Image (tube, rainbow, N blue to C red):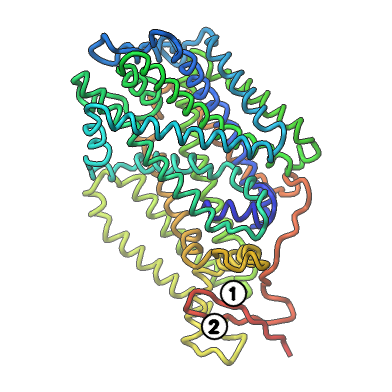
Amino acid sequence: MLILELSVGQVFQTAAVAGMANVHKRYSGLGVSGTVASFIIVCYYCVVMGWSLIYLVESFYPELPWSIRNAEDVTNADDHFIKETLHLSSSITETTYIVGKIFAAVVVQWICVYLCLWKGVKATGRIVYVTMLVPIVMLFILLIRGVTLEGASNGIYEYIGKWDMSNLSEGQMWVDASTQIFFSLSLAFGVMQAYGSFNEPNSNVVQNAFIIAISNCMFSFLTGFVVFSIIGHLTYIQGIPFDSLAVGGPGLAFVTYPAALSLMPGISANIFCVIFFLTFFMLGIDSAFSMVEGIVANLQETRLFGNVSRSFLLIGTCGLGCFGSMLYAADIGYYMLDLIDFYVNNFCLLIIVFMEAHAVGWSHDRKGLYGLVGKNATVLFEFALSAGLFIMIFTVFVLWEYSSLVCAYGVGFGCIGGVILICVLFSIYIGAKHVAAYSNEIADHGALVSAAYLLFSHQPIVFGDILNSAITSGEEGMKNWKVNIIWASFVKFIVPTCCMILLAFTARTIGRDQGYGGYPLGFQILGTFVMLFVISFIPFAMIAPKLVLKNKITLNKQVSSREKEGSVKATIDFAGDYNLEKKESA
């Protein structure tokens, strides 16, 4: 999906709104939904960065407020975060005021975001060198210091040496992992399309996507050693069990890790706290202004804001974002952040990624597929696979925790699977007759193989050809990496299936727990409303695409479909590609 988003922006030289319209004219709403989701997320993300700014300032205090040097556990650090920083109320329904220092920190954060972007993309590129390279240097400083502390090996063992494979059976763990990857790679936000559009059309985008993804994972893996080595030191000095500490979420960054750093002798505790929270702040500001840049770029492609200048949109986005962040600066802000983050991250991002894959794998050049294998074969094939997917979702949603029921219904599902397989085979048979009707040169066996190949891979392969023709254009692009049939298969089958299963896991969690987090029904409805509002732009754009885009989008047709006066046959190259050859009618 990273390859898809970057290449859409690069090849079509647009952000997500117009870029997805180039994939299919009715999918521009994906860019709008991603933009709205990005705005909601950046509002509370800047609040978290505001917390880090508060802690950065407090790191210069002679006596660290979260120090546990004279304590038996991390209670002091926990109290400082919950009571003195967040001023957290006892319930989400009880709110009285906005926390002053969080308010001030959020305003500073948004001013920093604006200043990073107001000079334009070129200036932002220079800023990124600072906001990325400095944290990397600081991270290595923390790593070297961490692994040299007593007890560091205990933490590292907990990180990579202790395996509990039973966790793989927990559906929510997979949801959390996938949404974390989406967030860290900025997928589904419309950000990658916007930044991809700043590249030349023949840049080596496939290679770039691999470098970005691998670098991101390596950076995260390295950060784990930084965190767990110092937490291991904490457990060694305090003599407390590892399982009693918060090693995830805000509790890790604002309770456990600062508490561990406070155990270092003398002024070194302050120095390493400054390094940590400055790293935290700089990485956060980098993510925040990238999301805002994506928001502005996508708004400029919409009909409503298409004629508004970039500078005015930037001021408006930052101003409205700062106002939206005030909700999370209140004494119930932590609860609201947790609630909104769940519904937006766990639902909206998965739905957007699913629809992006659907646009390329199932909707792009549908008429061309109709012309090749016939409408009946295409509809039957899609219906059969969709039915199989929804049966799988039903299994996950209803029967996941009841192995006896799975066994009881296993025979029934096996029969249904057999029917689906028959439908797929029959659709291939119908498609083969349609393919063979265009040429006497194709034997029955060749027609079957051609029809199967077209039904399973035509749409993403055609779109891949469009991408490859731009990526490899010119002398500089001849050696660039191409998208291939493996990528096409993932986009058409693997990504949509995984997204639907993960959505089922999330929905099952809500159904089982009678709402997320034990929050009252009214707040559950609020979270659901926010989720529906974000994704509502997808069907709206499908119904009225002209009301979304600034200008009418001319679809890229470098790979032609069936023409009215011609006929088309498919020939297979088993090395991985196929070519469409036109034979003019007599």
- Position in image of residue 486 (x %, y %): 46, 65
With 471 as the anchor, is 274 left or right in this view?
left
Q: Which mark is residue 374?
A: 1
With 352 as the anchor, is 222 left or right in this view?
left
Instruction: Report the residue at 61% width, 36% height from top.
Output: 36
State the quadrant of the C terminus. bottom right
Instruction: Report the residue at 81% width, 39% height from top.
Output: 307
Vertical comparison of 94 with 225: above or below: above
**Given the image, on which type of amino acid does mark 1 rest?**
Gly
Residue under numbered circle 2: 433
Vertical comparison of 222 with 413: above or below: above
Residue 542 visible, this orientation: no
**Of 182 and 545, the residue lying toward us:** 182
**Given the image, on which type of amino acid does mark 2 rest?**
Lys
Q: Are marks 2 and 1 in contact (CB under 8 Å)?
A: yes
Instruction: Report the residue at 40% width, 35% height from top.
Output: 140
